[in-house]
Amino acid sequence: MRPHTSVFQDETRLDINYLPSRLLHRETQLNFLNQFFRFATESPGKMSQRVLIVGKIGTGKTVLSQHFGLNITTEAQKRGINLHYVHVNCRECKGSLFMILQQTILKFIPHFPKRGYSEAEMLQALMQILDERNAYLILAMDELETLIRNGGPDPLYKLTRIHETRLKAPQRLSLICILREPECLEMLDPSTKSTLQRNIIHLEEYSKIQLRDIINARVTLTFRQGTVSAQTIDLISELAASEGGNARYAIELLWRAGKYADASELLEVSPECARKAAVSIYPVIQKDTIASLGLHEKLFLLGVARRFKQTDAAYITMGDAEDAYAVVCEEHGERKRGHTQLWEYVKTLSASGIIKTEISSLGQRGKTTLISLPMVPASDLEQELSKMLHMKKE
Ligand code: ADP
Ligand code: MG
């Protein structure tokens, strides 16, 4: 037998720190950044800028800022301007301005002594380095809430006021503040707050369609051709859309789904792999919810689970579900319930989150209800239900 070939082509491109070369669906926001920082390549030193990027987890804050940083420094280089972009994560710096400054200085002077300076001296040292090199700096401070929580209003006060003490000198330090919880700004003094709020870029949650494009692009970069089906990509986008339009979650799911496919030596990453991945991130097989279902709701759900085990599709139709339910009823010696009653079951099951329904207008037969099993692997669900139904009989 031939050894199993991995579905991955280059797994490293699913790493959270990987910077994709294309940024999708963030053109407007990238344009805003370009506008805010136009002076940096046109008249550097004449002004400095502070921009706030706000958005929930996985809305692309970090990747947007890094992309912008790469673009603007390339542009500056072409024009012979010594502009640097430094991205620091405030959480990794334990919310300490001292550590943020230290990390920043180390980008310019890798052997800068780590001890013997106060925070104020570090800030001065940084400005001096920029002056000596006739350099300009855009400092992006990611996960800014940790700096505010840890240091209160002072650190940002100092950073945003630095040029006021350097009258007539060129303005060399601009800031990009990246924040998930805008409420945090309430902890700042009013003037720093209003300075920061002047230029805000809000990142909305990604829609399912946008997520699909992002995942598609990443699949091309990381998986061998033809190993991830459109159905799987669709399901992952669906899951990530309902997880707050979170691209980070989508990419994590994609990676784990690939891992499941490899572990089971599959040739393809199936929707079932994605469901398993979802459970491994949030274990949501809610035994209580399932146990509290009525007998025929359980039988119906068992039919649905079986059907999903037989197919690689991300959705089945209501008709498929009814057929599968009929078979299960026969097996259990139960008389099957009517169509109207089944609709009630579908409503209950989708209200509890076990299944999801969607109306499709595809195909010749007109509208039909599609059922998906977003959170639970069909095999786990089948096992659990069979166990419960079996116990009941004894
Ligand atoms: P945030 O910082 O808002 O939590 P990230 O910038 O870390 O989100 O994005 C999460 C993941 O999704 C990263 O792997 C990133 O590369 C990817 N990603 C987010 N937005 C996009 C996009 N618009 N195009 C391509 N990849 C994206
Ligand atoms: Mg981030």
Image (tube, rainbow, N blue to C red):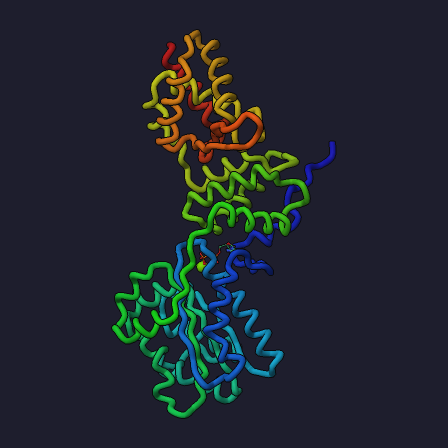
**Left or right: 159 in relation to 371:** left
Number of numbered discs visible in the structure rendering: 0
In this orientation, does residue 143 appear? no
* Quadrant (top left, top right, bottom left, bottom right) of the N terminus: top right
Q: Is residue 336 above or below residue 122?
A: above
Observer able to see residue 346: yes
Closest to the observer, 375 or 194: 194
Position of residue 315 measured from the top left corner of the image (x, y, whole percent): 52, 31
Name the residue at 55% across, 32% down: 362
Percent from the top left, x then y, of residue 338? 40, 14
In the image, 184: left or right of 309? left
**Image position, residue 184 (x, y; %):** 30, 63
Q: Single out the residue that lies furthest toward the right.
A: 1
* Vertical side of 364 occupied by 394: above or below: above
| Residue displayed at 25% across by 73% down | 190
Asked if residue 43 lies left or right of residue 178, the reply is right
Along the line of sight, the residue nearer the viewer: 258 or 44: 44
Task: Determine whether 321 is above or below 21 in the image.
Answer: above
How far from the left and from the top, in percent, is residue 7?
A: 64, 42
Q: Quadrant of the C terminus?
A: top left
Nearer to the camera, 67 or 368? 368
Residue drawn 60% across the image and 60% down it: 21
Which residue is farthest bottom? Answer: 168
